Image (tube, grey):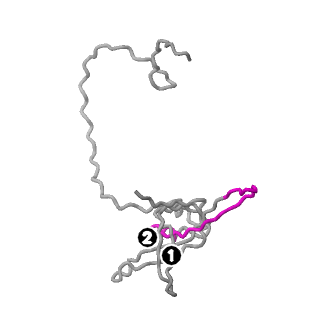
Amino acid sequence: MSLNKVMLIGNVGKDPEVRYLESNPQNPGNNVKVASFPLATSERFKDRSGELRENTEWHNVVVWRSNADVVEKFVRKGTQIYVEGKLRTRQWTDQTGNKRYTTEVVADTIQLLGKRPDGQPEGGYQGGYTAAPAAAPAAAPVQPVQPAAPAAPAAPVAPSAPAAPVNPAYNGPVPAAEPSDDLPF
């Protein structure tokens, strides 16, 4: 078994860079959107001398398709967000012929945190977003329920043991008194 999962809460380091990738050269209007941005996470701690220190780690975040739409509309430099996804390392050859590597967080879930930024429309800021699952098949229409015919009167029942008293504060039966036992406490 293996697991590749990343969960981060941090501040966006610069405005997201949004690009469109051609998915089908015969249909140029159907491009795939991808957005990338740096995310800073910080931890504070006291060193041996008792001085407060802060360590900031930078993460490259990549989001695709509908998550990229949300990032494009709502995420700006300084926005605090929650990101959930997986690590991915890519390699390529640069212009000088050297192999280069980069590690990115490919986000599956993006959630906007904090207050609504200035200038955002009141109904436009949702506070969080996860990619919508595939559409479910339509449900069959609901049929109206016909009222049931009145039931015949019940036959008399033989008397049984008396019901236990009810405690109104407890909203249930009061336990019957148990004979005392010989426990020392």
Picture layout, residue 85 above or below residue 139: below
Quadrant of res 3: bottom left
Residue, far bottom = 96
Q: Amino acid at mark 1?
A: Tyr
Kindly identify the residue that appears in the image at 33 percent across and 58 percent down: 136
178, 94: nearer the viewer: 94
Give the percent coordinates (x, y) of residue 116. Answer: 59, 62
Q: Of the residues shown, which amino acid type is indicated by label 2? A: Arg
Residue at image location 39% in from the left, 17% down from the top: 163
Q: Secondary structure at mark 2?
A: helix
At 50% from the left edge and 62% from the top edge, which residue is drawn?
A: 110
Residue 175 in picture, x, y percent from top left: 46, 19
* Numbered badge on residue 153: none
Left or right of residue 123: residue 144: left
* Residue 60 locus on image (x, y percent): 54, 70
Q: Which circle, 2 or 1, is nearer the viewer?
A: 1
Crowding around mark 2 (Cα neighbors within 10 Å: few <14, some 14 to 19, many 20+) is: some
Residue marked by disc 1: 101
Left or right relative to 118: residue 32: left
Q: In this view of the protein, which residue sits in the foreground, 170 or 110?
A: 110
Taking depth in this image into account, of 80 and 47 the one nearest to the observer is 47
Q: Which residue is mark 2?
A: 65
| Residue 46 falls inside the magenta stretch | yes
**From which residue to which does the magenta span run?**
44-72
Query: Marks 2 and 1, Cα distance to the nearest angstrom?
Result: 24 Å
